[in-house]
Amino acid sequence: MQLYTYSAICISVHDGDTITCNIDLGMSIWSRGQKIRLARTYAPELDTPEGKQIAQWLTSQLQGQTIIVRTIKQRTAEGFRDKKEKYGRWLGEIYLNDECINDLVISRCASLTSPS
């Protein structure tokens, strides 16, 4: 497994671009209840029909599933560190069965919000 890549279990989906998971750090150490913001994604808000639809789809894909989380790193003077966004959530790429969920969310959001 690559550095900064972890096995995790998705325990809930908050909206179309945020999940909560328990992350296996190795050697029987777990980080529980970690919020992960899907990097590069901008899902519609939950108070819109599109936001509800993408959140429901993401829930159907990830809820209870074992996933791979690849956290985004930020270069600092001291080296690399995990990058968090303004609400304190970790930024990451999510993979299920070798498929990047972030990319799927982006394409689904584009199809939901594009004019007919």
Image (spheres, rainbow, N blue to C red):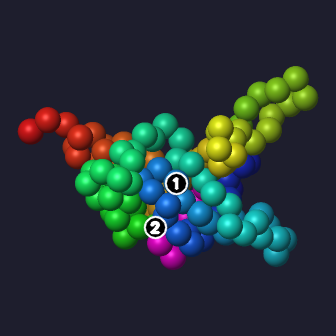
Q: What residue would you read off at disc 1?
A: 18
Q: Which of these two is toward me, 114 or 51?
A: 51
Q: What residue would you read off at disc 2?
A: 62
Q: Residue furthest right?
A: 78
| Residue visible at 80% across and 38% down in the picture | 81
Q: Amino acid at mark 1?
A: Thr
Can you give x and y, in whole percent of width and height, for residue 45 in the image? 39, 48
Q: Which of these two is toward me, 82 or 25?
A: 82
Q: Residue furthest front?
A: 47
Q: Is residue 91 above or below residue 20?
A: above
| Residue visible at 73% across and 48% down in the picture | 3
Q: Which residues are magenta?
A: 63-69
How many neighbours does mark 2 have within 10 angstroms: few (below 14), some (14-19), or many (20 or more)?
Answer: many
Using the numbered discs, state the Cα–Cα distance from disc 1 to disc 2 in whole angstroms.
Answer: 11 Å
Residue 67 magenta-drawn? yes
Callout 2: SS: helix
Can you give x and y, in whole percent of width and height, for residue 115 in the image? 14, 35
Q: Which of these two is toward me, 113 or 27?
A: 113
Can you give x and y, in whole percent of width and height, for residue 50 in the image? 27, 51
Callout 1: SS: strand
Quadrant including the C terminus: top left
Can you give x and y, in whole percent of width and height, for residue 11 in the image? 56, 72
Q: Residue furthest left?
A: 116
Between label 1 and label 2, give the one nearer the viewer: 1
Q: Residue furthest top?
A: 77
Image quarter for residue 56? bottom left
Q: Earlier in the sequence, mark 1 or mark 2?
A: 1
Residue 52 magenta-drawn? no
Q: Is residue 116 left or right of residue 102?
A: left
Q: Amino acid at mark 2?
A: Leu
